[in-house]
Image: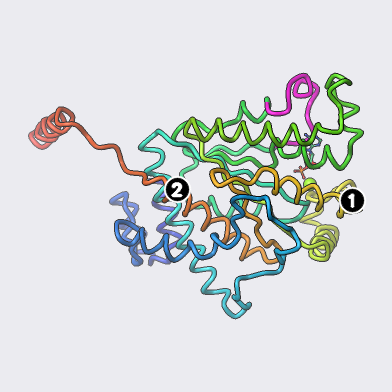
Amino acid sequence: MLLDLKLAARSGLSREERAMARKSGKPKSRRKRPSGMDLEKAVKKTRKFSRPYAVGDGRKFRLKDVDPADTAGFGSEAKPAAREALQIGVETLAKLQDILYAQDRWSLLLIFQAMDAAGKDGAIKHVMSGVNPQGCQVASFKAPSSEELDHDFLWRCNKQLPERGRIGIFNRSYYEDVLVVKVHQELLEGSKLPRRLIKKNIWENRYRDIRSYERFLANNGVVVRKFFLHVSREEQKRRFLERIENPDKNWKFSASDAKERECWKDYMRAYEDMIRQTSTEESPWYVVPADNKWFTRLVVAAAVVDTLHSLGLGYPKMGPEKIRELAEVKKALLAEK
Ligand code: AMP
Ligand code: MG
């Protein structure tokens, strides 16, 4: 109900129409929301934005082949059309999430990785803006606590996996253990891993363990999709300066972010290796151009819609007994004085 009202407010209804919506508990939407055939159309319309950025089998992947400023031929004059496509994506996502939740079988895990200021938080906020918060769980992973360091690197993430019927979002993840930890190997030395296990092949082992873990998740109905928001070094600089100059954005910036920037090349190498080693057909990476926030959000929304649609979700079908029961309750309700 609350969400319906929010949607009504956003859909540009008049005050009268909104009042009616409030009374009936249902908004009278001017624009039909995607359902039935509309859903198919909406999926088709958005799919073309995500597919080109899905890596699948990563063995031939090269980071230099993806331009962070790419907008799939959309110039800035096409921004309104892109915004409309994003709106369609967000609404379709909400519709599919409702079915995912009702069906209560699959869960979807969305993993976000990126350099600082690439737009992870904004993408998560915008793409998930239409979904029912009950069906969505977000977890952020920072430098590990001493309790977390007392366990294997998958432990803290495993505890946060989405329940069936839910969408889980990881803002950073176990992939940090082949990114920041690989770039700053002293973190490994400082961890509680037995010395003997800190060898050259540790990264290969971690990639393999991640592949196995994600296969395990897939075999158990957890669908994993991974997003690397690929921002350029120049655009990061611009956004850092904005965070410093705008007092409302100061909180987003820390001097250590600028320090990590010095290791840009090492990070890019680590990202490329990670994608090559852990992108699979069943758990692909999307390498999303991130110099234009509006485009990043569109690609992510489209990928989530495409993924949910591919599951062939449907509302649970009621058996004859349940249908009989509903008919009886309906009769009793109508007979009430
Ligand atoms: P933010 O997401 O900007 O709040 O930053 C979180 C910080 O935690 C980033 O600098 C990450 O690199 C860091 N971080 C996340 N996971 C790990 C990890 N496993 N080991 C070390 N640092 C991590
Ligand atoms: Mg940060």
Q: Tag 1: residue type? A: Cys
* Ligand 1: image quarter: top right
Image position of 19 (left or right of 239): left
**Residue 144 on image: x %, y %:** 78, 30
Kindly identify which residue carries mark 1: 263
Dominant SS type (magenta): loop
Residue closest to the eye, 198 or 289: 198
Residue closest to the eye, 184 or 63: 63
Residue that extends furthest to the bottom in the rendered view of this protein:
77
**Residue 111 on image: x %, y %:** 63, 43
Label 2: element kind: helix
**Residue 314 on image: x %, y %:** 32, 43
Q: Which residue is located at x 63 percent, y 40 percent?
A: 170
Quadrant for the C terminus in the image: top left
Q: What crowding class fits label 2: few (fewer than 14 Cα within 10 Å), some (14-19), or many (20 or more)? A: many
Q: Which residue is located at x 59 percent, y 56 percent?
A: 54
Q: Tag 2: residue type? A: Leu
Image position of 136 (left or right of 138): left
Image position of 334 (left or right of 249): left
Q: Which residues are magenta?
A: 141-154
Kindly identify which residue carries mark 2: 308
Is the shortest distance between ligand 1 and the CB of mark 2 under 8 Å?
Answer: no
Which callout, 2 or 1, points at the residue further toward the start of the chain? 1
Q: What crowding class fits label 1: few (fewer than 14 Cα within 10 Å), some (14-19), or many (20 or more)? A: few
